[in-house]
Image (tube, rainbow, N blue to C red):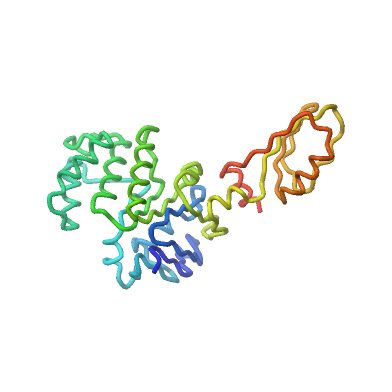
Amino acid sequence: MYAIELQSLTKFYGKHRGIENLDLNISKGEVFGFIGPNGAGKSTAIRTLLGLLTPTAGCAKIMGYDITKKGVDARRKVGYLPAEVDYYPEMSSRELLEYHAGLYGLKNAGTRIQELAEYFELALDRPIDDLSYGNKKKCAIIQAVLHEPEVLILDEPTGGLDPLMQNRFFELLEILNKQGVTIFFSSHVLSEIQRMCDRAAVIRDGKIIAVEDISTLLAKQMKKVRMMLKSDVELVLPEGAKNHHFTGVKHNFDYVGPTSELIQWLGHQDLADVVLTEPDLESIFMNYYER
């Protein structure tokens, strides 16, 4: 049994496509990334997966529970952190979190609430309406993890958090994952996906266009080449070279293709120096979109 299963999951808004024919299996205990720019369909996919939107076609399961037929059982297993948070303004964070704990039947949750509030430096007794966006996001993070869910679904989770709190958030996720929690991490911040995830799906225009291991994605036979020649000569680039920039004897380009062929080509050049580096995830991501 997978933690999350999508089978041809589709959502249309009238004639307008939100997502179409999403197929995905996420194993228990996996940290899975969902990559795509704003408007690609990430939030629609998540809201449909959670049963907040009714699928137009297809189906989805969380921990084996069909989100349409057994939606309540499925959602009991989930901690959800939406991209935008909005709460009862007259409540304090403490009141909200205690209310949340009550919905899940948690007893004596006050100690855990206090621990998490201190960890994220959240003032529990201020009215939520007086909190900054970043502090509201801290409250939302605590709410998502308080009931010890088996699956965490995070939609652009770091918006509003300063770098220190982002690091604390990632550290908390790493602890929870070691305890067996499955994490579905949706973001357009590619460095976050690269840091946290085992695999990632790339979504574009409501369709998944690739699912890859992050390590495989980063080693996708793509290299950044910086080289200096001993003399200023006309250079015939290897097949697979792109984004070529040069000044005199200095040449920079991206290379997509077999590394062995690149090394062979370099061996025939009059080199003074050469540096090959792995591409960052953003370069690979843009390469997928261009293809």
Quadrant of the frame with the N terminus: bottom left
> At 72% from the left edge and 34% from the top edge, which residue is drawn?
252
Q: Kindly indicate the quadrant of the structure image that contains residue 212.
A: bottom right
Relative to residue 130, is residue 194 drawn left or right?
right
Relative to residue 73, is residue 240 drawn left or right?
right
The relative height of residue 53 versus residue 256 in the rendered view (above or below) is below
Q: Position of residue 140 (x, y in %)?
A: 29, 45
> At 61% from the left edge and 43% from the top edge, which residue is drawn?
283
Q: Residue furthest right?
A: 233
Q: Position of residue 71 (x, y in %)?
A: 30, 67
Q: Residue furthest left?
A: 108
Q: Nearer the viewer, residue 78 or 112?
A: 112
Quadrant of the frame with the C terminus: bottom right
Q: Position of residue 232 (x, y in %)?
A: 85, 27
Relative to residue 207, is residue 237 drawn left or right?
right
> At 80% from the left edge and 26% from the top edge, which residue is drawn?
248
Q: Position of residue 162 (x, y in %)?
A: 37, 33
The relative height of residue 187 versus residue 26 in the rendered view (above or below) is above
Q: Nearer the viewer, residue 179 or 136?
A: 179
Q: Nearer the viewer, residue 287 or 115?
A: 115
Query: How many tags in the picture?
Result: 0
